Amino acid sequence: MAISRRRFIRQTLTFGPVAMAFWLDRDLAAWASQCGMPASGADCTLPSPPPAKQFVPNEPKVMTRYSALEMSQPAMATQLKQFREAICKVRDLPKDDVISWTKQVAQHCIHCASSNPTNIHYDWQFLPWHRGLLYFLERILRKLGGHDDLRLIYWDWENTASRTLPTIYAPADQPLYWANRHLTGPRWPLPNDKVDVQPLLGVPTFKTFGGTAVQSTPTPAVYSGPHANVHNAFSPGDMANLQFSPRDPVFYAHHGNIDRLWTSWVAADASHKNPDFGTAKVYFYDENRVWRYVLMNDLRDETKLGYKYSSLMKPKSSLKFMQETPLARKVNHLTLAASTMARLKAPSPDFLLIENIHDLEKLPASAVDFGIFQGTPPAGTQSATAKGFLGTVSRVLSSGHAHNERLSAAINVSDRIGRLAEEKKGTLDLTVAPLDATGKTTAAAIPLVADNISVVS
Ligand code: C2O
């Protein structure tokens, strides 16, 4: 197939742009019968592996991962075609093959139940584990596609031009298409505040940003912002179901951007440091179907993994001049010091950091978004226009098991918190309420109790 198509391109190129456009359509049509679907229902099992061999990443060549928007440009057509062909090859592997698309989903699924002590979403594995999944998929694509320079694509949803499903993923009958996607309704296009990376870039410590060795101490803030929001935008499609979200090829572009957010966080300020992960390891099948472990410490520098991003996300104002101030509180009643009030009223950005919100299990189990308020809004309040609304925090549900984890929030409260605190003479009474897809509260707010609350301003 590859040879005849190459010959076809060569022939077609000589006929100029009209024939070329015809060929592109034919090319998309050609995929339909070529790409397999992962087995439905059977994608949460792996064979019991032999003892893992260590993998020490040390790639000789650093290539660029481009955004989905960049990859849609005509100059990238060849690279995009190679990427699609390679994805198709993985999707075509028999489902029992340990590197098949089905087993990519399974590698994620087995770590997903919230009762699972090795769940990779609520501790410091979250960023390195997903980086490892993407890296080994990239190596599989490089090998099966026969292009060692091939790199994954990231979906730059923080960019106002990229707030809908990337165009290269959309057409049916090509390897990046996935039928079970929901792309209309109030969550589309992705609203600014649901993909705002500024408060996350401003988080001063890895502990708050990316968690610690112990589950939910705290839950990483990077899990419950844009990460959860982009998953949930696809509800009720596969992307909004945490355990099966890697069925959809756009999952890997979404997590490419979460990975880029990690790199961007490290680059955002000299004080931002990855932890020493010690002997912590993550496990994957490599492109030769060998069960591997990688030290999380070896996943901290992505250039060792042979890639860099075509651009990074940047803080809007220098983090050097911002500081974190813990807020004194009694349950959910916060009292702000005069110096904190002065900082909040100044025109610079203000971010509210909340580690581990308690009691979410008292709110409806189906809720994915929670509004954080000053004051107690009644059920049915539209958060966007409510005076006391400060921001949202979100989770991703899995069908088939409960998600009772505590959530951490990093929210942008720049224009709101100073005004609210002034009105309340230096105090705030914080609450949390479940929101529907339109942003309306669906139940009465409850007091916001958390492990730590601070402002970065
Ligand atoms: Cu492992 Cu975005 O999920």
Image (tube, rainbow, N blue to C red):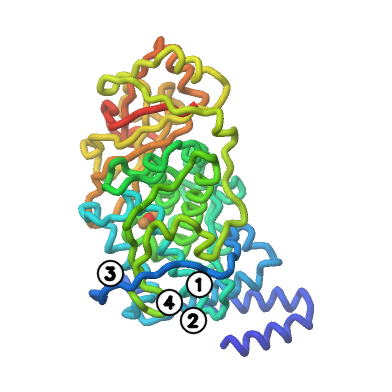
Amino acid at dot 1: Pro
**Based on the displayed image, in which of its 4 quarters is residue 219 positioned?**
top left
The answer to whether the residue labelled 2 contacts the one labelled 1, judged by CB atoms less than 8 Å apart, is: yes
**Mark whose residue sits in front, 1 or 4:** 4
* Element assignment for label 4: loop
| Residue that badge 3 annotates | 41
* Lateral position of residue 270 relative to residue 98, left or right: right
Q: Is residue 247 above or below residue 140?
A: above
Q: Nearer the viewer, residue 10 or 202?
A: 202
| Disc on res. 446 | none
**Labels 3 and 1 touching (C-beta < 8 A):** no
| Alpha carbon distance from label 4 to label 2 | 21 Å
272 to 56, vertically: above or below: above
Q: CA distance from mark 3 to mark 1?
A: 21 Å
- Spatial CA span between label 3 and label 4: 24 Å
Q: Nearer the viewer, mark 4 or mark 2?
A: 4
Number of the front mark, 3 or 4: 4
Left or right relative to 430: residue 48:
left
Closer to the N terminus: mark 3 or mark 1? Answer: 3
Q: Residue 34: which numbered mark, if any?
A: 2
Q: Amino acid at mark 2?
A: Gln
Image coordinates of residue 159 in percent, x first then y, are 59, 47
Q: Which residue is mark 4?
A: 287
3D distance between C-alphas at marks 2 and 1: 8 Å
Q: Earlier in the sequence, mark 4 or mark 2?
A: 2
Under mark 3, the amino acid is Gly
Q: Which residue bears the numbered disc 1?
A: 175
Task: Please state if 224 lies on the left or on the right of 138 as rendered.
Answer: left
Give the percent coordinates (x, y) of residue 127. 41, 53
Q: Earlier in the sequence, mark 1 or mark 4?
A: 1
Estimate the x, y position of residue 414 in percent, counting from the top left: 51, 26
Q: Within 10 Å of the Cα at label 1, are there few (<14), some (14-19), or many (20+) other Cα atoms?
A: many
